[in-house]
Structures are given as structure tokens and as C-alpha cells.
Image: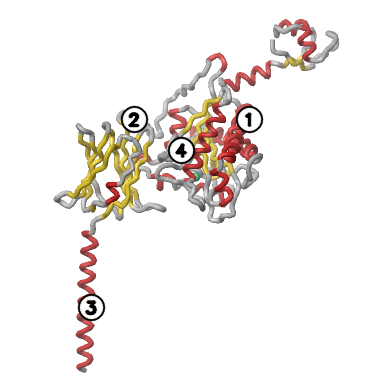
Amino acid sequence: MRLETELKKSLKSLLQAMLVTLTLLGAAGALAAEKISSVRVWNAPQHTRVVFDLTGPVSHHLFTLDNPDRVVIDIPQAEKTKALDLVDFKGGPLVNVRSAPQANGDLRVVLDLERAVNPKSFLLAPKDQYGHRLVIDLEKTGATRVPPTQRTASRPKSFSDMGSGRDIVVAVDAGHGGEDPGAIGPSGTREKDVVLQIARRIYHVLKAEQGIKPVLIRTGDYFIPLAERREKARREFNADLFVSVHADAFDNRRARGASVFALSRSGATSTLARVLAERENQSDAIGGVNIDHNDEMVTSVIYDLAMEGSMEHSIKVGSMVLREMGQVTHLHKKHLEQAGFAVLKSPDIPSILVETGFISNPGEERNLRSQSHQVKLSRAIGQGIISYFDQHPPPGTYFALRKQQQRAQQHRIARGETLSEIAQRYRVDLTALMQYNRLDNTDLIRVGQVLRIPNS
Ligand SMILES: [Zn+2]
């Protein structure tokens, strides 16, 4: 009996002790200051992104001060850490980061700037390698982002020479960038780095071709949301073709080979295509997109019709690029694949996504880093694009006019025509016309015969 009471007593005190501990833990949880564990800075042409990694979600208040220009961020119940003293500014508008605890318990972070900026901030929930993040975008003043739905009706193109037709604009998009490293190879190679190198090489291959004007969507190590990549191609460059360059990973390290994808609006052509599209579409969540500029998929009859037309061309150009790539690298599949890649959803610009290889495969990772392999790949991709436009030149381009001229260089003989009349019409020398067509007698021609006209 006594023992029982003793036992009850000690049990009771044990429970009490546990309760106190729990209450203390709870209180500590509520009061715990969040820490900024690291800070990253990414400089893009139009903005600088500053990312604070946090140990938990925070609220924040942001305001600007001038003379000198500063952005101030107050974070309640946050703790100062060394990370704030070790920021690598990389030569943007940001010149210094200072921080100090305030009397009210807030942590004040001050970004000292070289010039005034238009700051925007938002929080990102944990995703993949990242925990909670506070993102501050310091946009260049005067730089405006046009929402994806706005678009001018006319599409002024760049004319290199009105007389010889305009240039075909090819937008080369290096995938990922900045906060979003893309896939990471077994030796640590980051997709965002190798695809930027390859994209730059493709740019140079295309630049060497008369009648083609390549443009790079991403020019450095910074993130661009998927919808903005498509919009840049359309709004800023009026591109005739959009090519997104990637090098992705698969769980199976033995998976290898290059592939080319076009958009599918009705499911993927294979499991791998579906998995890759799902991974690629995560880019916004990893790279960090403010919910304000979320991608809205336009749905209308006009959109559908335009999409049908551009998808047909996407498939054609993609197949030609794949064929060329097959000459220099192993192909994952011999035919073009389709899946729901968000970056390819331009209604009126043929768009393809090139997976240059599997960075998850140790052999291919090595190849993707190698200069000679990058050269081979970019030449093949460039050649595929050039061959496609040779066959399907957009009207009014240098390629289209050249094709017309090539066609005009032939003449089918009609009833009653003589060789000298034909020579006169094309302003070529009769003897030259005969020699060119291996004719040694003016009488030896017949109706329907096709003559090749030499350049006069
Ligand atoms: Zn990728």
C-alpha cells in the first residue's frame, strides 16, 4: 500500500517535471530567434538578387533610404550571424552589407548601394537543397518587366539589309542559373555552368552563318523564371526559334545519351520524358519566383491554332538537330520526344529543348566538361538549326530570298522558246548557257527540259 503511494508520488512528480520541461521547450520554440545561415548574391543584367538562407520562416519589413542609397530590411526575432559579414558582392550595385540587432529584438540588415534601385522582396518555402529563403531583388531603376500576357501586335524584326532579307533570330537559352544549379554530376559539375558554356558555343556557330542572328537568353550566372525566358525570346528579340540547352540527371547513373524534346500538350512520349519535364519545371521553385509573376497558361482558340503550327515546326527542327547530334554523340533515343516542358510553351515560336547528355552518368559528365566535346555538340546543334532554316526559311529572311534565287536559277523550256531568247531573258551569255547545260547545238532542246541558269 505504502509502496503504491510512493510509486504514485514519484510518478506524479516525474509527470510534473516532464510538463515543466515541455512548457519550457514550447516557450523556447516560440521565442527562438531565426538565424541567417548564408547569403548569396547573383548579378543579372537588369537586377541583382540577394538571397538569405534562414533557419526558419520569418516576417520582414523593407524600405529604402537615399543619400547614400540603401535598402533596409528589418527582421523581427532574428539573430546576427557571421554569414552577414562574409557576403561576396561580385561587383554589382551592392557595395556592403551591414547588420545590427535593434532594441526591440529585430535584426536590421542594411544593403549599401552604389546607385538607387527598385527593391522587391519575397519569401520562398523550403525546396530541394534549400530551406526557408528571403529573396531581395534589386532591380535597375527604369527596368520594367512586361507581364507575359502583354504583347505588341507588330513584330518588328532586325533588318541586317532590307535588300537581302532580314536575319533569322535564334534564341539560345542556357537552362537554370543563379540559385538554380540544375542537375549536379557525380564529380560536382553543375548543369547551369556546362549549359552556359555550350550555349555560348552554339551562339558562335550560328553567328558565323550569314542570315542568322543568334541571341543568348542568359548571359551569366543568374536565374531567369521559365515564363520570362519565353517572353524574352518573343518580346525582346522577336525570335524565330527558341532552343533551351540542358544536361540533366536521372536516378539510374547508367542512363546516357543526348535527346531533343518538343512540347507535348497531351502527355509525354516516354516515362523519362515525363520525369525530365517534371524536373525541369521545378526550376522556378528552386530558382525562386515571386508569386506575382506566376506563369499563366493562355487558353484560347487563337492560342491553340498558333500552338499547333509552331509545334509542327518544333518537331521538324528538333528532329534535324537530333540527327546532327547523332553524328557526334550517343543518342538516348533515335527519335524526338515530347513532354510538357513549361519553357517550351510559346504559342507562336517553334521551341525545342536539347538535353546534351546525362550529367549523372560519370562518362557523360566528363564529356560535358570537355572543350572538344562541347565544340562537337554545339557545331552539330548549330548545323541542325541551319539545315532546318535552309529547308523552311521564314518569309522575308535572307534564307528565304536565297532559296527563291536558287529556284529562279532554273528554267523549264516552254513550247516555241529558243535558247537565245532564254539567254536574253536571264541576261546571260548564250555560249555560257549552253556550256553550263552541256549543250553543243542550239537545236538540241525540247519542251519541258529544265535548264540551269548560270549566274550572270
Ligand atoms: Zn535542366
Whether tag 4 and tag 1 are in contact, CB under 8 A, the answer is no
User: Would you name the residue on which mark 2 appears?
Assistant: 143
Indicate the position of residue 407 as horizontal and vertical percent values.
68, 19
Say what amino acid the circle numbered 1 marks.
Answer: Ser
Q: Tag on residue 15?
A: 3
**Mark 3 or mark 2: whose residue is earlier in sequence:** 3
Q: Marks 3/1: CA distance?
A: 79 Å
User: Would you name the residue on which mark 1 appears?
Assistant: 387
For residue 139, which quarter of the picture? top left
Circle 2 residues within 10 Å: few <14, some 14–19, many ≥20: few
Identify the residue at horizontal 57%, vertical 30% (top origin): 205
**Mark 2 or mark 4: whose residue is earlier in sequence:** 2
Say what amino acid the circle numbered 3 marks.
Answer: Leu
Indicate the position of residue 8 as horizontal and vertical percent values.
22, 86
Task: Specify whether residue 409 is in view.
Answer: yes
Q: Tag on residue 299?
A: 4
**Mark 4 or mark 1: whose residue is earlier in sequence:** 4
Q: Is mark 1 within 8 Å of ligand 1?
A: no
| Residue 94 in the image: above or below residue 124 | above
Quarter of the rendering occupied by the N terminus: bottom left
